[in-house]
Amino acid sequence: MFSLFSPKEKYSLGIDIGTTSIKAVELTREKDRYKLSSYAALLARPSAQDMRTNTRIDVEFMQRPEGDIADMIKSLISAGGFKGMNNAYMSLPAFSSFTTVIDMPMMSEKEVRSSIEFEARQYVPVPLSEVNIDWNIVNHSAKDDQKKPQPKSDVPKPPAPAATAPAPVPRTEVLLVAVPKEIINKYLKIAQFAGIKLASLEVESFSNVRAIIGNDQSSGIVLDIGGQNTNISVVYNGIIYATYNSNVGGNDFTRIIGQSLNVSEQRAEAIKCEGGMVGGGQTTDMHVRELLLPLTDKIINDIDRVISIYKHRRPDVNLDKILLTGGGSNLAGVADYIKERTRLDVIETSPFSRIYYAPALDATLNNFGPTLSVACGLAMRGV
Ligand SMILES: Nc1ncnc2c1ncn2[C@@H]1O[C@H](COP(=O)(O)OP(=O)(O)OP(=O)(O)O)[C@@H](O)[C@H]1O
Ligand SMILES: [Mg+2]
């Protein structure tokens, strides 16, 4: 029999609590493609911060009471008119998590399950009793025999080159993700207070990769320039191998402009967004570019160090492209500058290239794409 009614649409809501803004994207599925149902964003940083002081503006954000963050999510939900609160996905900040691929002798899934805790103890820099562990076999018969434990978040120094090339040995590579229980509990409370039913939590780097790489077997660096941090993820054949944290974000660009030109945060933000690194705004443009170069160089140096590590650890991986995302990647001229300095292919990405939406939203979503990438990737899980 034919039904007179179309099946009930399923909505999936992705919520990204960033240090600078909270973003939500709701998707449905139309045949074999994602369809945008609604989106909304809300500034999350404490207001009236004086840009002339040396305090990091958003550092307190994660310490804010769950009820306050939940209230912001409620405002966001009413602004977006969302319907997918019973099928919600939230991201966990990459800087609070530990992600690495560990190298084990060739073994079955059952064998991995029984030995993962022992292995994880050698890699995770905090007691296992304090973290939730998730793992997944990403590659049987991996040939690299040079894996080393990764420090928690800051970009480590590249190791010295190996004296002799290792003989190829069949291996099993296991992606390991550890997140402090304290952080997970905080997010569970936020969801509960906000009245949303959480289907899953995931580390934001994974959401980004889903949003901008999807099922492509691409390899490269995903660079998420956020407000407070920049996440550098190493992706091999579409799978994250590790995520490192560079301690510079878009808010540092605003702060340096504010401090150097002695203007308010709002004015500094406007100068940054108008001209970025290329000028075209109303202020002393060359001066602004010079102010932003050292901060961008810090991010580039961190990328270089990550690439050096992977050149050594995975000589078979060609990390020759950088996929840019995060609100900070909107900075005019930043993609060209990173390209010039690294000589890699630098690609500005948008999660909306994989999502159907009303053409009237084109201009808006072009601007917001990088900011909404994590929320899009989260929502993609649920439809
Ligand atoms: N057009 C623009 N030019 C330059 N910077 C921009 C532009 N639009 C947004 N930004 C910057 O992007 C940053 C916010 O990015 P995003 O929303 O990705 O951060 P977040 O997810 O809240 O932070 P984090 O990922 O560090 O937790 C801010 O510093 C903002 O000033
Ligand atoms: Mg972010």
Image (tube, rainbow, N blue to C red):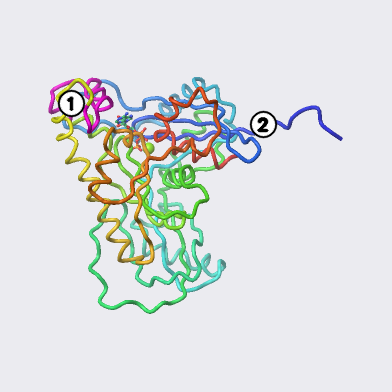
Question: What's the mark number on residue 141?
Answer: none
Amino acid, disc 2: Glu
Question: What's the mark number on residue 258?
Answer: 1
Q: Dot 2 lies on which element?
A: loop
Where residue 289 appears, as percent x and y from the top left, is 18, 33
Horizontal side of 290 relative to 71 (left or right) equals: left
Which residue is disc 2 drawn over?
9
Residue 46 position by quadrant = top left
In the picture, the quarter occupied by the N terminus is top right
Most foreground residue, 44 or 27? 27
Residue 291 position by quadrant = top left
The magenta stretch is: 257-279
Q: Is residue 274 magenta?
A: yes
Most foreground residue, 379 or 286? 286
Q: Is mark 2 within 8 Å of ligand 1?
A: no
**Ligand 1 quadrant assignment:** top left
Most foreground residue, 202 or 118? 202
